[in-house]
Amino acid sequence: GHIEGTEFPLTAEGFEGRGSVKLTRLREVAGHAQIVYFQGKVRFLYDLSFEIVWVADIDDKKFKGKLEVSDVIQDGDEDDVLMDANFTPKTDAQAAAKELFSSDGPAKESLMDSIRTFQTEFQGLTEHGIAAHRATQGTRSKRRVDPNKVAAQQEESRQATQEAMQQRDAIAQLSKSNPNCKVTM
């Protein structure tokens, strides 16, 4: 799930077994992520961009760079996500490293796995939050008050409060692991 620490062996012809590129740090995260409850449906909205620092170790020589990633959106697919290693290779070794970041390279698939993990964790935040929202809606008719329904609603409200607290903790954990990404409900 986490992209940091992922290492890719070189696959360019003539460079197999001669080194690797390691993604070392996620930084410069920008964008938004929201969970919207509208017309009885939950919608997950996000539009993110970020930068990943990488280090290549080829033939015992090291160099580093950055990978800019943009257009990570809720309804997008793999082709929508843009990756740009944003440097002009000056050596064959640098060209071999840059090849890993091509649109069909191994870094793209690893990145997509991390995005899918984020999406799953993000959507998991609603399991408790939507229950809390529904529990606070109340009854439609005030004509009759059924004591059993009132007791059931109070219990549901108590559970919703507890679930809302769990949701708050989950949001705090997600925000802690992604400090530059704002999570709102």
Image (cartoon, rainbow, N blue to C red):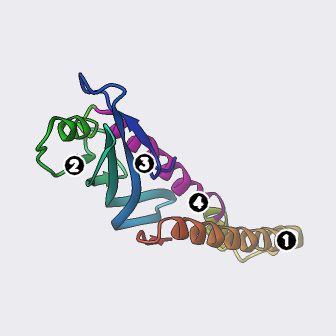
Q: Which residue is mark 3?
A: 115
Q: Residue furthest front?
A: 60
Q: Looking at the image, is mark 4 or mark 3 earlier in the sequence?
A: 3
Q: Quadrant of residue 65?
A: bottom left
Instruction: Classify mark 4: helix, strand or loop.
Output: helix
**Does residue 10 appear left or right of residue 124 in this picture?**
left
Image position of 86 (left or right of 60): left
Q: Residues within 10 Å of mark 4 (few under 14, many from 20)?
A: many
Q: Earlier in the sequence, mark 2 or mark 3?
A: 2
Tell me the residue at 52%/46% (across/down). 1
Q: Residue at the top extreme?
A: 13
Q: Which disc, if any, is residue 126?
A: 4
Q: Secondary structure at mark 1?
A: loop
* Amino acid type, callout 2: Ala
CA gap, disc 2 to disc 1? 64 Å
- Mark pair 4, 3: CA separation: 18 Å
State the CA–CA distance, disc 2 to disc 3. 18 Å
Q: Which residues are the magenta region?
A: 105-128
Quickly name the residue at label 2. 85
Looking at the image, tell me whether mark 2 or mark 4 is earlier in sequence order.
Answer: 2
**Residue occupying the point 35% across, 35% down:** 19
Residue receiving disc 1 = 146
Instruction: Give me the residue at 39% from left, 37% from top.
Output: 8
